[in-house]
Image: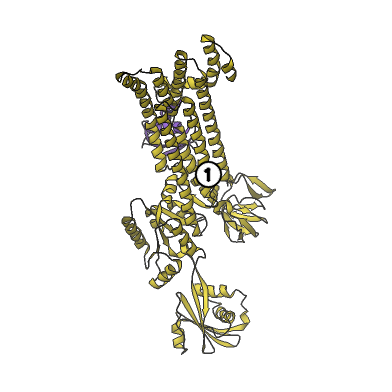
């Protein structure tokens, strides 16, 4: 299952860091952050609860880049 | 700060006076750096910036007390950040606006006149009204009116198209001169405009190799520079001590701090996605839709271009392409042919009638006999007309002349005497030969044409176009095999692209490195299967697409080499103590500004 989320982030490298953090989150199969369109596309693992996983993704992203936002 | 420079404050007063601007400017950086430490993000750029400036202050406190440097570095860093977010936001908006073909409303006819509604709410089969100057919001069929349509936003083609009753029209076109009533055939979400927007917006999410390279580079660059800084700060003085010189601790710590200023990879990282975004946006304005940054990158190294013949290099419709050995006026011969064939629905008959192009006066025709597989005999304007193939001529005992050209030949006899023949063939697109030439000029090594047609037809078209290789008599499955053969025989680095009309060559389009579908406005299957979609059916656009891709990739490489080069140069100069912090921060911000401006160039592809 793939879902697209709108995000807010200031610099391109921070977007890359968010992508890495999202990829490393449990339940996420793959993630892409598009800095130009400010979108995060998350592919969840089968059977993963998207809402719960996204909370973790947000938490992990906040860790690497404090001033980022994911509109869930 | 300038003022402070001239005030001769001493000691702690001086320190406090400089700390005011420093904290005002750098307050948020210091705060973020603090949070970064709590989250154990040591290589966070805010942290590094804070460390560099605080370090500079410490060096100043112990040294001659020039605090200007720390304040200035912080100031320029902030200005750089500000410019970056301004430039990126601005170009993001500009490019999105450029691609904005989204209609805001649809005019629906109701009992109380015309009502404006959200295009999303219009059901299939509703009649909508499009006034002059408005965009067609949803795909449909014209039920009333006749107008010229400006398709430039979709195809990049500036010559307007005419839409008549019964024609299908696609959303995104602008109605130029009169009112059209359109019965919608699709929902808004399924309409061309939505699909195109969706595709272009998502294209930059498919990342290219260069983007991945830069991400990986950025990932290792910052830690590497920091370790370098540490080695320099400790190693430099130790080496000097061992060699018996003055260790110059402060000097080397200062040099190490210069390293930290250059350690932010943002200039590198920002320009690459921006270039691709601009390139994809620019291409879409020219009617070239690229589905991903990775495809744009692959397209730039396209060295083998394989074409389908029918519908791609030729128009895919039969037309009269010549009248030979006519004993009467060509026009007269066409007239006889059209009159004799007027009742037939065969494509050949239709093309004859189309070529004649005038109304048929039925009173002039009588005694029409269709001889299946041979042709037609008829009495037209008092003459006995024979119109058909060689078999018909032979059976009627008429001496005919063979045609030396390729195509379907219609022989004509008037009152039992041979009167010449009409050649009907699939017409090569007027720009096809030039397209092949331009491909060669833009660095394509080999052009190949695949066709299901007969050897004779294929060879003659290939010769006329100047393609390098041609394979004829192929079934759709054979085309896949042929493309696989070509894929196997080429160099790993060279990319193969296949160009088709997307109707029956979807498997081949899928198999090639880059599948290009052309003239596929409104054809869903083609948009699904292809990596690059050409909105109109002009083969010249293939070369244009390749040139656009080359330009974009050239800019990407310029930025990569330029940014990495300047960074390495600054590191080297910093290590030797030639470059100070001022130069480092200027170089860093400057590189970013130039890289961003350069990236925007990828948007301008009109004249490429």
Query: Looking at the image, is B425 positioned above or below residue B385?
Result: above
Q: Nearer the viewer, residue B472 or B32?
A: B32
Q: Colour of chain B?
A: yellow
Q: Nearer the viewer, residue B475 or B534?
A: B534
Left or right: B282 as drawn, with respect to A48: right
Is residue B59 visible from the viewing direction of this image?
Answer: yes
Q: Nearer the viewer, residue B288 or A69?
A: B288
Position of residue B217 measured from the top left corner of the image (x, y, whole percent): 38, 35
Query: Looking at the image, is B552 positioned above or below residue A67?
Result: below
Q: Nearer the viewer, residue B275 or B379?
A: B275
Dividing the image into 4 quarters, which one contains the N terminus of chain B? top right
Identified at 43% across, 25% down, the residue is B258
Which residue in the structure is indicated by mark 1? B601
Give the letter of the chain under mark 1: B
Q: Colour of chain A?
A: purple
Q: Residues within 10 Å of mark 1 (few under 14, many from 20)?
A: some
Position of residue B231 measured from the top left corner of the image (x, y, whole percent): 34, 24
Identified at 53% across, 47% down, the residue is B282
């Amino acid at each position: 299952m793939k879902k697209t989320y709108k995000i807010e982030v200031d610099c391109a490298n921070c977007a890359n860091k968010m992508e890495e953090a999202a990829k490393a989150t449990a339940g996420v199969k793959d993630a892409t952050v598009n800095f130009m369109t400010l979108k995060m596309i998350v592919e969840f693992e089968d059977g993963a609860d998207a809402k719960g996983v996204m909370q973790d993704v947000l938490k992990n992203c906040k860790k690497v880049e404090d001033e980022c936002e994911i509109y869930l | 700060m300038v003022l402070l420079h001239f005030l001769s404050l001493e000691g702690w007063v001086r320190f406090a006076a400089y700390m005011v601007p420093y904290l005002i400017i750098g307050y948020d950086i210091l705060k973020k750096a603090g949070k970064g430490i709590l989250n154990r993000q040591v290589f966070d750029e805010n942290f590094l910036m804070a460390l560099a400036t605080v370090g500079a202050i410490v060096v100043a406190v112990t040294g001659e007390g020039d605090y200007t440097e720390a304040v200035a570095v912080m100031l320029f860093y902030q200005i750089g950040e500000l410019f970056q977010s301004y430039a990126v936001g601005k170009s993001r908006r500009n490019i999105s606006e450029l691609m904005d073909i989204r209609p805001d409303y649809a005019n629906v006819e109701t009992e109380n006149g015309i009502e404006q509604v959200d295009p999303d709410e219009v059901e299939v089969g509703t009649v909508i009204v499009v006034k002059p100057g408005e965009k067609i919001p949803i795909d449909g069929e014209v039920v009333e009116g006749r107008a010229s349509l400006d398709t430039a936003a979709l195809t990049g083609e500036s010559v307007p198209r005419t839409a008549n009753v019964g024609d299908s029209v696609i959303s995104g076109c602008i109605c130029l001169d009169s009112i059209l009533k359109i019965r919608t055939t699709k929902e808004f979400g399924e309409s061309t405009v939505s699909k195109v927007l969706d595709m272009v917006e998502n294209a930059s999410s498919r990342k290219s190799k260069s983007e991945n390279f830069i991400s990986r580079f950025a990932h290792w660059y910052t830690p590497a520079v920091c370790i370098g800084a540490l080695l320099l700060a400790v190693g430099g003085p130790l080496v000097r001590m061992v060699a018996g010189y003055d260790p110059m601790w402060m000097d080397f710590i200062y040099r190490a701090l210069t390293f930290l200023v250059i350690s932010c990879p943002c200039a590198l990282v920002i320009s690459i996605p921006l270039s691709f975004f601009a390139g994809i946006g620019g291409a879409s304005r020219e009617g070239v839709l690229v589905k991903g940054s990775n495809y744009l990158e692959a397209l730039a190294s396209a060295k083998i271009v394989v074409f389908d013949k029918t519908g791609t290099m030729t128009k895919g419709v039969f037309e009269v392409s010549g009248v030979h050995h006519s004993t009467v006026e060509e026009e007269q011969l066409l007239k006889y042919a059209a009159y004799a064939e007027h009742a037939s629905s065969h494509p050949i008959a239709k093309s004859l009638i189309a070529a004649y192009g005038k109304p048929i006066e039925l009173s002039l025709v009588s005694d029409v006999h269709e001889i299946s597989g041979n042709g037609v005999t008829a009495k037209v304007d008092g003459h006995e007309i024979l119109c058909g193939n060689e078999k018909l001529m032979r059976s009627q005992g008429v001496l005919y002349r063979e045609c030396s050209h390729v195509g379907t030949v219609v022989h004509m006899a008037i009152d039992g005497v041979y009167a010449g023949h009409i050649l009907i063939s699939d017409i090569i697109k007027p720009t096809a030969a030039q397209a092949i030439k331009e491909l060669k000029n833009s660095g394509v090594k080999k052009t190949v044409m695949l066709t299901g047609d007969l050897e004779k037809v294929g060879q003659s078209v290939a010769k006329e176009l100047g393609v390098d290789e041609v394979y004829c008599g192929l079934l759709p499955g054979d085309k896949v095999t042929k493309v696989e053969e070509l894929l196997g025989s080429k160099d790993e680095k060279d990319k193969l692209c296949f160009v088709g009309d997307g109707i029956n060559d979807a498997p081949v389009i899928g198999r090639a490195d880059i599948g290009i579908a052309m003239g596929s406005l409104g054809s869903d299957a083609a948009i699904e299967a292809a990596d690059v979609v050409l909105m109109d059916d002009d083969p010249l656009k293939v070369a244009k697409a390749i040139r656009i891709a080359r330009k974009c990739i050239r800019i990407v490489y310029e930025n990569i080499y330029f940014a990495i080069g300047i960074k390495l140069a600054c590191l080297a100069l910093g290590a030797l103590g030639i470059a100070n912090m001022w130069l480092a921060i200027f170089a860093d911000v400057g590189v970013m500004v130039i890289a961003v401006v350069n990236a925007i160039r990828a948007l301008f592809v009109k004249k490429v």
